[in-house]
Amino acid sequence: MQKVIETLLIGLTTGSIYALMSLALVLVWRSTRVINFAQAGQAMFATYIGFEISSRSGIFWLGLLFAIVGGALLGAGVDYFFMRVLFKHANTGPAAVVAPVIATLGLLGLIRSVVGLTWGGEFKTIEAPASTDGYTIGSTTIPFSALNALIIITVSIILIGLALLFQRTNLGLALRASAYAPEIAKLAGIRTAQTRTIGWAIAGGVGGVAGMLVTSNNFLSPYSLDLLLVFGFIAAVIGGLESMVGAVIGALVLGIGLTFILNYVGTSLVFIGGFTVLILVLLIKPDGIMAKGKGRRA
Amino acid sequence: MSGLAVTRLNVSHGAIHALHDITFSVEPGQLAAVIGSNGAGKTTLLRTLSGLKDASSGAAQWENREMLGVKPEDLVRRGISHVSEGKSVIPELTVKENLVLGGIWRGDKADTAQAIEEVVELFPRLGERMSQSADTLSGGERQMLAIGRALVSRPKLLLLDEPSLGLAPLVIEQIFQTVDHLRHKLGLTVVLVEQNAMSALEIADIGIIINLGHVVATGKAKELIDDPALRAAYLGY
Amino acid sequence: MESWRKARAAVRKKIAFFILLGWALLIIGDRVDELRVYQGAQIAMYTIALASIVLLTGYSGQVSLGNGAMMAVGGYSAALTLNNLQTPIWFAFLMAILVSACFGSLLGAAAARLSGPYLAGTTLALAVGLPAIANQFSFLGGEPGLLFDVGFPPERFGEEFTQYKWFFWIASVIALLALFITSNILQSRFGRTWRAIRGNSLAAELAGIHSSRMKVLAFTISSALAGLAGAVLAMTISLVAPGAYSLTLSFALVTGAVLAGVSSLPGVVLGGAILVAIPEIADALAGRFGNADSLNNYLPGLITSVLLILSVIYTPNGPGENLRKHLRKKHAH
């Protein structure tokens, strides 16, 4: 019983980090109809900035702030300079469908190379802002630490903040309208291009937080966020890609599920487990678990 | 002149020349009914005027300013609102959110709230359904919502694309009556595109008949209704 | 009857072309130095791998990032066969083809209903994860991997025939065969059917084409090619290890395919040459800038990514497309 609770708590921690990544992916998908594989690169870049600030100042939270800002700026930059050019040029022929996909992959490689050239490939570490010792309850120590609790709290705050932004503000309304029905939004006077860039900025900032959280007490390298991208993607697919709530739920489900596999079966099957879940969801319930029956439009 | 002046407008869909040298003008405060059969190019005309489509040549001016080539969201700021074909509401949003959407660009929350109140006075049914999701509305209610959202932008020129499409006759009556009423009340200039030629001409000041991308006739609405040749060709009797 | 005779003449012409090409390669191989010979083997390897992408993405329109993973499957199958069953080399290559074809058909079955970004994301997951899987199971050799030694060239070729020449020979023969077969497949009704599916799968279905089956077939053949390429890669480095089939490889393949024209089979040779040239250029540049570790590690990636981005934006259908557009414009006037 105790192991179940432990696994659940750790799974919740992992899942909440995945939730940030999958949320960022869904945000961009909804507004631009592109799966932004470069998200891993953007988050990684933001995390390196966070690393620089936090290691120089000794304050994790300052680093996190800079990571958010850096991630947001990079996200906006990618949309403004890269995506717009891409859609202007590559829109004919059989490659038109695949061009954005390949382009974001190219961007991922580009960011990774730039990061590697600037910081080198050796592992860096970011000091965790909270203790990583498990909590002790009575005579037993569970593997759930203060850091884990902090991660869950931080992610929850961000999620609530985003929910409020989207549901209660005019900006959030504009973002949703631009994503659901860009033409109608334009006719209502919404500057959809700028709104979309803001969406990318938010996604970038969120990705930066994900990168910082997953790296605290872990190793940072130009490749360290690839797995986060994959799991974020799987989580987004589970949730259906069209709904932000779904992205979060999918991520939590995935995080908890994978942790169970990790604890009860062993590390070898974690990735296979994740991959299998992806294939199963895509085959059995292609609209994701949150679908209201609208088809899976690519 | 102030008002809407379209001069030798040409629009193409790829290789297909959809509109040929369209020329007409609408005085401020007038309601112009643009009628013609399916595929005549009426929707293309409105989409070009509202900035959703590019023209290949020609000019269109509103209040003596060129409007072609301007982005739709910028035209809204000049007082031009386009209610596009097919009930342009966003089903994932609530009725209230759809209405608020029209006022975001102005950034004046108080004024937007005021405008929404005025819309609800006009369409009480919407007032009853404010927090409902827009996809639960009936066809007629969606049309009211679409027009309502356009009104929240406080337009001076209203472009309406086939508001009667898919609606029951009684509802169509209502919509037309309301359009006529509010354009007098607010002093709007209206371009009303319709297949339902009779009802449109009855509330219009002038009529413009388009066939296969050409303007075939323009004139006072009353005269067009009374012209037997036109009646036979376009009004069916 | 006439068309039959024409078709057979065309095939005969093609065979002649390939034989001529092979003979030319043989002569070139004798005249160039060791490094170039080795690079020749690499180009041959890339050619096969790129052919797999041309078939899968260029013809059947499925964007997969998992070709690197399929190459791994092929490489590992070949190594395991050679090491554990002591079979002749050609059998090891055959196993590479068969096993990766099997995996390919499985992946294809799962992927047939996916499109665009979903397919890309799923295959990306595969590409990222497969090396990780190899690390987990000890019979796969873990991180250091397994040996793959094709042995020395036969004695009758004489003293002058080096190990690298042997690699080049084997790789080229395999590449020529693979390209020949692939070219025939692409020009057959299979190729036309794939193009129909890529263009408009609904219309294709209505025309009676069984799109899912054809898509799975595309995946199967493409994976077989990739697996073969993987085995050839293993031969050239005498090793199969997770690091050789990383995401970077899948990346490079996509780049090479887009650069060379994703739907043009002849382009794969150009693509292969570019892929081999990039590390060379990167090396030269790194040398001029002081040869720092980070430069050596990340400069090739930088060049590759920039090339990929530029080519996707400006020539998404390959340079051939732009050329054709240019010529068409000239004719129109």
Image: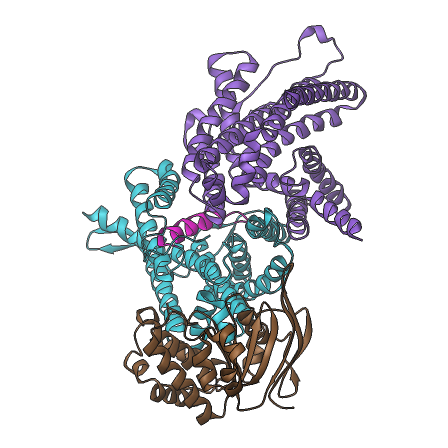
Q: Where is residue A290 in the image (x, y as percent from the top left)?
A: 32, 56
Residue shown at 55% from the left, 19% from the top? C93
Residue B110 appears anywhere in the view:
no
Depicted C303 relative to depicted B137: above or below: above
Colour of chain B in the image: brown
Residue shown at 37% from the left, 36% from the top? A268
Name the side, left or right, on which A73 lies relative to C276.
left
Residue shown at 46% from the left, 89% from the top? B183
Q: Which quarter of the rendering shows the N terminus of chain B?
A: bottom right
Colour of chain A in the image: cyan
Give the overall secondary structure of the magenta segment: helix
Q: Where is residue B37 in the image (x, y as percent from the top left)?
A: 51, 69
Q: Where is residue A49 in the image (x, y as percent from the top left)?
A: 55, 61
Which chain gets the purple colouring?
C
Depicted C297 relative to depicted A14: above or below: above
Q: Image quarter for residue C167?
A: top right
Residue shown at 60% from the left, 49% from the top? A106
